Image: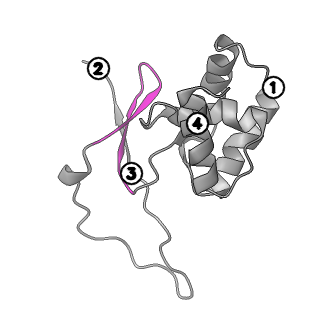
Amino acid sequence: MKTEAQRHGSDWLASGGLRPTRQRVALAALLKGDGKDRHVTAESLFASVRENGDSVSLATVYNTLRAFCDAGLMQEITVDGSKSYFDTNTHDHPHFFWEDDRVLTDAPSGELEIAKLPNVPEGAEIAKVDVVIRLRRT
């Protein structure tokens, strides 16, 4: 019998056209089971799934996060060349990156104004603008 979180996770998978395998449902339940958005790394999600008692390899977590992104269920935010965060909120919005804690959070989008973007080369178009504001505690 599925828990409420697993049902929400399965519905979320269905909205992206993904088959609800055991591993996907376990990860989706952690990511969207309570209906809230999350910012995770593959490593933090792997730790959460292990704490929850599920058996999923780190490679499966990486592959599943990629599948979720490809299905439009998540977006990947690269903070630096070595670390990716995954966000279940797929609407365009800025982020705060807290350098001291290495945590990514949503920034208020209503306060962001981008007055002008550079001209793009001929034959190209802007697909997306990612805004990550790095913060340090004082």
Mark 3 secondary-structure assignment: loop
Circle 4: residue type: Arg
> Hey, which quadrant is residue 26 in on the image?
top right
Which residue matches tag 1? 57
Residue 118 on the magenta span: no
Q: Are the two marked residues, 3 and 1, in contact with CB atoms closer than 8 angstroms?
A: no
Which residue matches tag 4? 7
Circle 2: residue type: Arg
Residue drawn at x 57%, y 87% is: 123
Which contiguous range is marked in magenta?
92-107
Q: Are the two marked residues, 1 and 2, in contact with CB atoms closer than 8 angstroms?
A: no
- Nearer the N terminus, badge 3 or badge 1? 1
- Foreground mark, 2 or 4, reads 4
- Foreground mark, 4 or 3, reads 4
Q: Are the two marked residues, 4 and 3, in contact with CB atoms closer than 8 angstroms?
A: no
Looking at the figure, which quarter contains the N terminus? top right
Q: Which mark is residue 15?
A: none
